Amino acid sequence: MQYLKKALLLILLILPGCAKEYSCEGCYTPVLNDLITTYNIHITDNSKLKAIYPQVMDKLNPGHYLIFATIKPGSNKDSIYKGTFDLKTILPMNRFQKGDSFFVRYEIRWKIPPEDFVQADTLVY
């Protein structure tokens, strides 16, 4: 009985000194100051596609999106369009400050309207 009391007392003294383990599986915090946007768009019938237009809205263009590139349709019947854009190479970064937000979306313009908007991203500088 005496050993049991000593073991219990030892455990009670050791437990508060143990560091807690914090883990987060699959957690992702976006890296600020990284203005890279990626797209992965699958078009099943390229004959109906006019073009895909990546667009950005920022403090220089409040209230509307500015088209900054054109992705032309492929020659296959269906295509997967993948790629990345670095907004730091496209926009005049000397006019922005830390903490500015950039809203990116991709417009799929069909030969017969209406258009579709996909993959909206929010990037923070």
Image (cartoon, grey):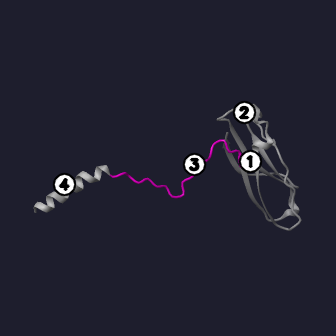
Give me the C-alpha separation between circle 1 and circle 4: 61 Å
- What are the residue bounds of the magenta stretch? 18-36
Using the image, tell me which numbered label, if any, was put on residue 105.
1
Label 1's element?
strand
Q: Residues within 10 Å of mark 3 (few under 14, many from 20)?
A: few
Give me the C-alpha separation between circle 1 and circle 3: 20 Å
Give me the C-alpha separation between circle 3 and circle 4: 42 Å
Residue underneath mark 4: 9
Give coordinates of residue 65: x percent, y percent.
Answer: 78, 40
Q: Could you tell me if the residues under marks 1 and 2 are in contact, i.e. CB atoms within 8 Å?
A: no
Give coordinates of residue 38: x percent, y percent.
Answer: 72, 53
Does the magenta segment cover residue 23? Answer: yes
Looking at numbered disc 2 in the image, what kind of residue is underneath it? Answer: Phe
Q: Residues within 10 Å of mark 1 (few under 14, many from 20)?
A: many
Using the image, tell me which numbered label, if any, was put on residue 91.
none
Residue 65 lies left or right of residue 33; in this view the side is right
Residue underneath mark 3: 29
Q: Residues within 10 Å of mark 4 (few under 14, many from 20)?
A: few
Q: Earlier in the sequence, mark 2 or mark 4?
A: 4
